[in-house]
Amino acid sequence: MADVTDQTINEAYLKVRDDKQETNWLLLDYESDRSDKLKLTSTGTGGLAELRDRLDDSKASFAYVRVKYSNDKESVREKFILVIWIGPSCKVMRKAKISVHTADVKNVLRVFSIEVPARERDDLREEPIVIRLRKAGGASYDGV
């Protein structure tokens, strides 16, 4: 069971969800290699591109991101994604626990449109994620 009781996690989650805030992502990491306690590592305003730069290849992390996209000139949508990052150099025992810990994280980072498993930074390119968000969003008038 992951410990996600740190109050700063919930505060950052609420900031990412708030349209009036510039913060559009948060990153959670484990306190140490042996710990199951998650802590807020960082937040930012630069979206997926900025988040990708903050990921550590040796860690397993969770991120929550607000993604803004438009279907046409007139409409802009904002959707939320949950990222489960398992870096290419992540230790085996941490990888084994991540699926169990994901359920605990989902109890705190509750509202999201899609879950994005990422093993490489390219898994977090915006274009394929926006395509998935459009499909998850229901009616699509642009053939996606």
Image (tube, rainbow, N blue to C red):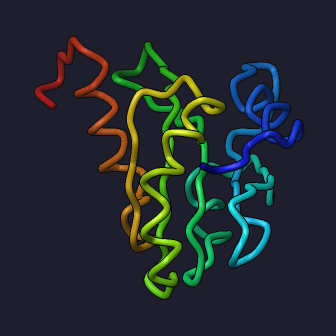
Camera-side residue: 96 or 46?
A: 96
> In the rendered image, which quarter is residue 130 located in?
top left
For this orientation, the residue located farthest to the bottom is 89
With respect to residue 27, does 95 lie above or below? below
Q: In the image, is residue 97 above or below residue 69?
A: below
Q: Indicate left or right for 49 with 118 as reference.
A: right
Asked whether 99 or 114 is in front, the reply is: 99
> Which residue is drawn at the image coordinates 77% and 50% (left, top)?
44
In the rendering, at what x and y percent does residue 70 appear? 42, 26
Relative height, residue 60 to residue 103 (above, below):
below
User: Left or right: 43 with respect to 138?
Assistant: right
Q: Residue at x 80, y 20 (%)?
A: 20
Q: Who's the residue at 43% across and 83% down the image?
A: 88
52 left or right of 75? right
Query: For residue 135, what is the image quadrant?
Result: top left
Residue 66 percent coordinates (x, y): 59, 35
**Residue under the image location 44 percent in, 15 percent down:** 75
Residue 105 position (above or below residue 111) = below
Image location (x, y in percent) of residue 10: 79, 32
Q: Residue furthest left?
A: 143
Where residue 18 sits: x, y (%)?
Answer: 75, 21
Number of numbered markers: 0
Quadrant for the C terminus, please: top left
